Image (spheres, rainbow, N blue to C red):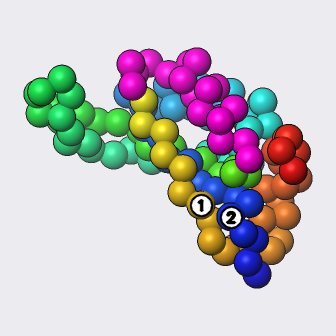
Amino acid sequence: MSNQHEYSMVISTSSSRESAMAIAECLIEKKLAACVQILPIESIYVWQGEVCKDSEAMMLIKTRTALFDELAGAIQDCHPYEVPEIVQIPIADGLPEYLKWIDGCVSQKGK
């Protein structure tokens, strides 16, 4: 089933469910993501030397690895944070039918 990391999951967080929904819709409309799952989370982190505790929305974004730069730019364009979390995790393997579904949903740039 190996796909040589053609696919990846990108993790990003936002300040609210509404903000995450807007980002997700943008990514889907631009064909940069096949699916974006949004989960409520609690985050504890350091920002500008201070410990912060916030409710956030985490986005799990399924895409093709070649689209990462464009996807990251699109997130930054509409994200409320000065420095948003945008982390790419390669998908080492997956159900071939699922990976084919991703191909059918996203842009084929870089392929």
Question: At which x and y percent is residue 37?
Answer: 57, 48
Residue at 39% from the left image edge and 19% from the top image edge: 82
Quadrant housing the N terminus: bottom right
Q: Is residue 82 above or below residue 92?
A: above
Q: Is residue 68 located in the magenta-colored stretch of the structure?
A: yes
Of the residues shown, which amino acid type is indicated by label 1? Pro
* Residue 73 lies in the magenta stretch: yes
Magenta stretch: helix, strand or loop mostly: helix
Q: Which mark is residue 5?
A: 2
Tell me where the magenta segment starts and ends, as one range: 66-83
What residue is drawn where x is 27% and y is 44%? 42
Dot 2: few (<14), some (14–19), or many (≥20) neighbours within 10 Å? some
Residue 26, x across and y down, in percent: 68, 27
Residue at 39 percent across and 44 percent down: it is 40
55 left or right of 73 in image: left
* Residue 99 seen in the figure: yes
Q: Which residue is mark 1?
A: 90
Left or right for 96, reference 61 = right
**Residue at 62% across, 65% down:** 91
- Report whether residue 23 is seen: no
Tell me the amino acid under the disc marked 2: His
What is the CA distance from the residue labelled 2 to the residue labelled 1? 6 Å
Q: Residue furthest bottom?
A: 1
Callout 1: few (<14), some (14-19), or many (20+) C-alpha neighbours within 10 Å? Answer: some
**Tag 2 near tag 1, CB within 8 Å:** yes
